[in-house]
């Protein structure tokens, strides 16, 4: 066999292995679904549907299509249904100002979603300041916001190296508890009738990196998650129902 061909085959096998490992790693490192917060009515209707949406759970009226709307109103992000923090969250060093953090992150989240819709070349929905008869209303709620333990997260990457049998570095497991996380719930409502057309819920933890610069900030993980959610919402609003919108990766090679 020619050396060039052998190298090509080896690279193909390596790439296939990396893709398979990434899928396995993503399933293991992703956050579990958050409990219902009370923001959504009838959350029991939601279920996982990875063939369409990247969220933990979702539901959509069979007759709903974003193509039936010309404009979008993004409501102020709700923070009245934040679930009671667990013991880890309550002992976090940032806990003394969590309410101010929540208010700030909520404003940033709304601005990020609006920005993504306005600047995306693939978006056809015009973002409006006041809903009209042809408007879909997007209502979002932050249901969990746990800041990362920055000083621990910064040194947690030092123990990377010893691979586990499934190919995940041991240091990643040690740093799980140091990652912050964020959970959201959302719904799409018809502006004219007030009818809820779709609902979703998702939770994301800080991404795992070999060198985690995001861990050097309290809410770097939340801002990443908000960016991912904004991009996903744009794709969902501008693609047919049979198009899969992929989940964000739980593992990143780059440190930023």
Image (tube, grey):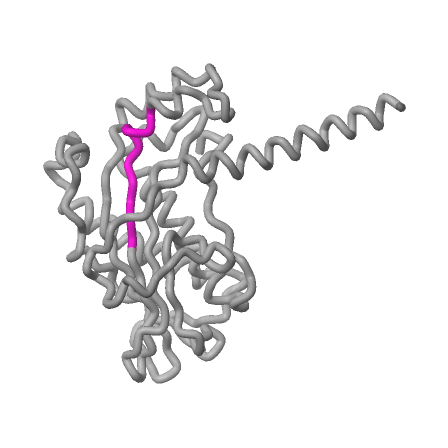
In the rendered image, which quarter is residue 186 located in? bottom left
Q: Relative to the observer, which residue lies in front, 115 or 246?
A: 246
Please state if 96 lies on the left or on the right of 238 as rendered: left
Task: Judge whether 162 appears above or below 143 on screen.
Answer: above
Can you name the residue that lies furthest to the right here? 2
Image coords of residue 91 (percent x, y): 14, 31
The residue depicted at 40 percent of the width and 49 percent of the height is 227
Residue range corresponding to the magenta coloring: 175-184
**189 relative position to 6: left or right:** left
Name which residue lies at 31% across and 83% down. 192
121 on left or right of 78: right
Please tell me whether residue 27 is drawn above or below residue 123 in the rendered image. Answer: above
Residue at (50% x, 26% y) in the render = 166
Q: Is residue 178 magenta?
A: yes
Residue at image x 48%, y 34%? 25
When asked about the image quadrant of residue 19, the answer is top right
Quadrant of residue 146 within the rendered picture: top left
Q: Which residue is farthest left?
A: 96
The answer to whether 160 is drawn above or below residue 60 in the figure is above
211 vs 228: above or below? above
Question: Could you say where residue 109 lies in the image, as x and y percent from the top left?
Answer: 31, 53
- Quadrant of the image for the C terminus? top left
Q: Position of residue 235 (x, y in %)?
A: 49, 60
The quarter in which the N terminus is drawn is top right
């Amino acid at each position: 066999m020619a050396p060039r061909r052998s190298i090509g085959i080896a690279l193909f096998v390596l790439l296939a292995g990396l893709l398979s490992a990434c899928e396995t790693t993503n399933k293991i490192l992703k956050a579990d679904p958050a409990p219902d917060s009370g923001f959504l009515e009838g959350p029991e209707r939601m279920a996982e549907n990875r063939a369409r949406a990247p969220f933990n759970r979702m539901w959509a009226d069979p007759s709903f299509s974003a193509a039936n709307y010309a404009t979008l109103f993004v409501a102020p992000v709700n923070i009245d249904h934040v679930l009671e923090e667990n013991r880890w969250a309550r002992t976090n060093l940032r806990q003394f100002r969590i309410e101010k953090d929540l208010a700030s992150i909520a404003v940033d989240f709304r601005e990020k979603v609006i920005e993504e819709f306005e600047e995306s070349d693939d978006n056809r929905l015009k973002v409006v300041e006041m809903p009209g008869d042809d408007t879909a209303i997007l209502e979002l709620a932050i249901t969990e916001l746990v800041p990362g333990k920055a000083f621990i997260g910064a040194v947690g990457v030092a123990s990377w190296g010893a691979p586990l049998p499934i190919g995940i570095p041991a240091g990643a497991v040690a740093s799980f508890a140091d990652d912050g996380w964020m959970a959201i719930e959302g719904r799409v409502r018809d502006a004219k009738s007030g009818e809820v057309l779709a609902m979703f819920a998702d939770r994301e933890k800080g991404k795992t990196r070999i060198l985690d610069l995001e861990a050097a900030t309290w809410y770097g993980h939340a801002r990443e998650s908000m960016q991912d959610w904004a991009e996903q919402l744009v794709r969902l609003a501008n693609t047919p129902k049979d198009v899969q919108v992929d989940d964000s990766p739980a593992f990143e090679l780059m440190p930023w």
